[in-house]
Image: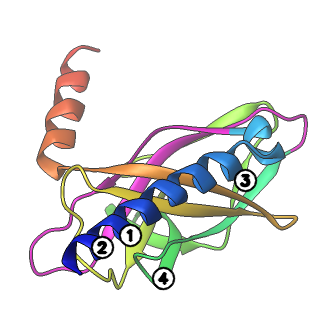
């Protein structure tokens, strides 16, 4: 019975990947691309994470990200860090415009997706499926890796020194 359950789990993952690839090759996928995406691994004892990526709009029209969803959480919000009274503060945004023939980068200390109420901790090398919701009822399903906070900080620090 245990073997059968494991086999079913693997089959479900495989079918999910195929469906994900099929859905992401829809018309929206040729209009948009998502690159360099990842989620941060959770800190022990917390149920919050964040997602980062670069979203490129390949159309002649502005597109608007109005939210995101996933089976890992019941609450994902678009956030941005802003400087206010000489302090960095985070605030929720209702939407994020991706200008025509341009891109927007979601990154630490900038725009990002805040993921609250995680069902389980996110571990390095996990893969997470997110659905990005755009205006005009357009959705894009993406799969992002979970990466270590430490590794990302080291990369950002290394990149910073090379400028």
- Residue 81 appears in the rendering: no
Who's the residue at 52% across and 62% down the image?
Answer: 130
**Residue 58 painted magenta:** yes
Q: CA distance from mark 4 to mark 2?
A: 33 Å
Name the side, left or right, on which 22 lies relative to 62. Answer: left
User: Which residue is disc 2 drawn over?
Assistant: 4
Who's the residue at 89% across and 42% down the image?
Answer: 61
Count every numbered label the image shows and give the total. 4
* CB atoms of marks 1 and 2 within 8 Å: yes
Query: Which residues are drawn in magenta?
Result: 33-61
Q: Quadrant of the C terminus?
A: top left
Q: Nearer the viewer, mark 3 or mark 2?
A: 2
Who's the residue at 24% across and 66% down the image?
Answer: 122
Who's the residue at 24% across and 81% down the image?
Answer: 1
User: Which residue is disc 1 drawn over?
Assistant: 8
User: Which residue is disc 4 drawn over?
Assistant: 75
- Residue 27 appears in the rendering: yes
Label whose residue precedes the other's in the sequence (3 or 4) = 4
**Crowd tier of the residue under label 1, counting other residues whose Cα lies within 10 Å: few below 14, some 14–19, many 20 or above:** few
Label whose residue precedes the other's in the sequence (3 or 1) = 1
Q: CA distance from mark 4 to mark 1?
A: 28 Å
Name the side, left or right, on which 80 lies relative to 40. Answer: right
User: Which residue is disc 3 drawn over?
Assistant: 97
Q: Quadrant of residue 85?
A: bottom left
**Crowd tier of the residue under label 2, counting other residues whose Cα lies within 10 Å: few below 14, some 14–19, many 20 or above:** few
Q: Nearer the viewer, mark 1 or mark 2?
A: 2
Name the side, left or right, on which 87 lies relative to 141. Answer: left
Give percent across and percent down for residue 70.
50, 72
Label whose residue precedes the other's in the sequence (3 or 2) = 2
In the rendered image, the vertical position of residue 158 relative to residue 87, given as above or below:
above
Name the side, left or right, on which 122 lies relative to 102. Answer: left
């Amino acid at each position: 019975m245990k073997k059968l359950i494991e086999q079913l789990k693997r089959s479900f993952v495989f079918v999910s990947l195929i469906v994900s690839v099929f859905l992401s090759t829809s018309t929206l996928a040729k209009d948009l691309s998502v690159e360099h995406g990842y989620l941060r691994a959770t800190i022990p004892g917390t149920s919050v994470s964040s997602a980062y990526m670069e979203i490129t709009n390949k159309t002649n029209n502005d597109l608007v990200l109005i939210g995101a969803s996933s089976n890992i959480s019941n609450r994902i919000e678009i956030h941005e860090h802003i400087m206010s009274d000489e302090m960095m503060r985070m605030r929720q945004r209702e939407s994020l415009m991706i200008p025509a023939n341009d891109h927007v980068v979601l990154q630490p200390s900038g725009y990002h997706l805040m993921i609250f109420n995680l069902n389980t901790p996110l571990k390095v090398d996990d893969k997470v499926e997110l659905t990005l919701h755009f205006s005009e009822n357009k959705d894009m399903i993406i799969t992002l890796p979970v990466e270590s906070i430490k590794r990302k900080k080291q990369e950002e620090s290394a990149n910073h020194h090379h400028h």
